[in-house]
């Protein structure tokens, strides 16, 4: 522990008579600005919501290290580690909010695109056998197999170097497929939607030589 303290003290000698309050204010203000900027950007920008959030955690780790160095100029190692840990936990909490925000937005997009089976039943109280067969849901086993196959194709395509528009479309298709998989038994309209998504996946496979 003493060796670690001496190591950081040697590094911090270059600050000389730097004012701790000023350094801490600059550090924490910059950290707060980055956090608020990340949240604001995700609120107003669809591209930022779809962007990978791991870079934010890299920035948080950097601020935690800077906070540790700044607090070592005034406090002991234990207190400095506590301050750096507080910064890291705040950043990790905001990181979770950013990921949750993305999931909520994806769910809303999937709900908007997934066909809703609100077929009026009152139109025909006693449908003919042919009509009953036409609106009957697809077998659960067949639906699960097709959905699993479609999700497998989507996962493989996501590993490809897709264009921005194709990647966004593919992510929406995968989210809609996941919603249908949770439901299990599909209606006739949802079966048609599954066919459309399957055809879209086949076009992407041909486009990217999968």
Image (spheres, rainbow, N blue to C red):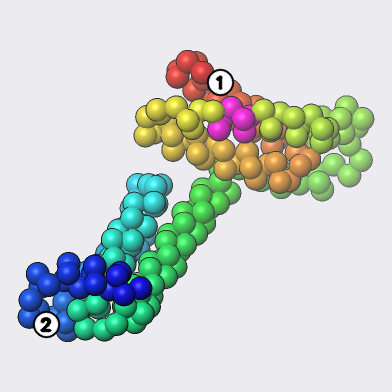
**Which residues are drawn in magenta?**
150-155
Residue bearing the label numbered 2: 19
Q: Main secondary structure of the magenta part?
A: helix
Q: Observer-nearest residue: 115 or 48?
A: 48
Residue bearing the label numbered 1: 202
Q: Is residue 83 visible?
A: no
Q: Is residue 111 visible?
A: yes
Secondary structure of residue under mark 1: helix
Horizontal and vertical percent for residue 65? 29, 65
Q: Quadrant of residue 39?
A: bottom left
- Give me the C-alpha separation between circle 2 and circle 1: 63 Å
Q: Observer-nearest residue: 77 or 209?
A: 77
In the figure, is residue 22 to the left or right of 92?
A: left
Q: Residue at x 58, y 23 (%)?
A: 199
Horizontal and vertical percent for residue 193? 64, 33
Disc 2 or disc 1, which is closer to the eye? 2
Would you say residue 154 sits in the magenta stretch? yes
Horizontal and vertical percent for residue 161? 40, 28
Horizontal and vertical percent for residue 25? 19, 79
Give the tally of numbered discs: 2
Q: Residues within 10 Å of mark 2 (few under 14, many from 20)?
A: few
Q: Quadrant of residue 133?
A: top right
Would you say residue 151 sits in the magenta stretch? yes
Q: Observer-nearest residue: 92 or 121?
A: 92
Q: Residue at x 38, y 47 (%)?
A: 51
Q: Residue at x 44, y 68 (%)?
A: 93
Secondary structure of residue under mark 2: loop
Q: Residue furthest front?
A: 3
């Amino acid at each position: 522990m003493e060796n670690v303290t001496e190591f950081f003290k040697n590094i911090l000698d270059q600050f000389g008579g730097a004012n701790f309050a000023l350094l801490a204010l600059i550090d924490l203000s910059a950290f707060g600005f980055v956090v608020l900027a990340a949240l604001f950007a995700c609120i107003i920008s669809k591209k930022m919501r779809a962007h990978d959030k791991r870079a934010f955690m890299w920035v948080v780790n950097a601020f935690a290290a800077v906070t540790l160095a700044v607090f070592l100029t005034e406090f002991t190692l234990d207190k400095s580690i506590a301050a750096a840990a507080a910064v890291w936990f705040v950043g990790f909490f905001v990181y979770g909010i950013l990921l949750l925000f993305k999931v909520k937005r994806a769910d809303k997009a999937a709900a908007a695109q997934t066909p809703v089976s609100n077929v009026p039943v009152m139109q025909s109280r006693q449908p003919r056998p042919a009509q009953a067969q036409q609106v009957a849901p697809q077998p659960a086993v067949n639906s699960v197999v097709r959905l699993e196959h479609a999700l497998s194709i989507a996962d493989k395509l996501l590993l490809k170097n897709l264009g921005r528009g194709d990647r966004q479309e593919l992510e929406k298709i995968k989210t809609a497929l996941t919603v249908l998989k949770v439901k299990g038994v599909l209606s006739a309209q949802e079966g048609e939607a599954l066919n459309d998504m399957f055809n879209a996946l086949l076009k992407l496979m041909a486009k990217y030589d999968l």
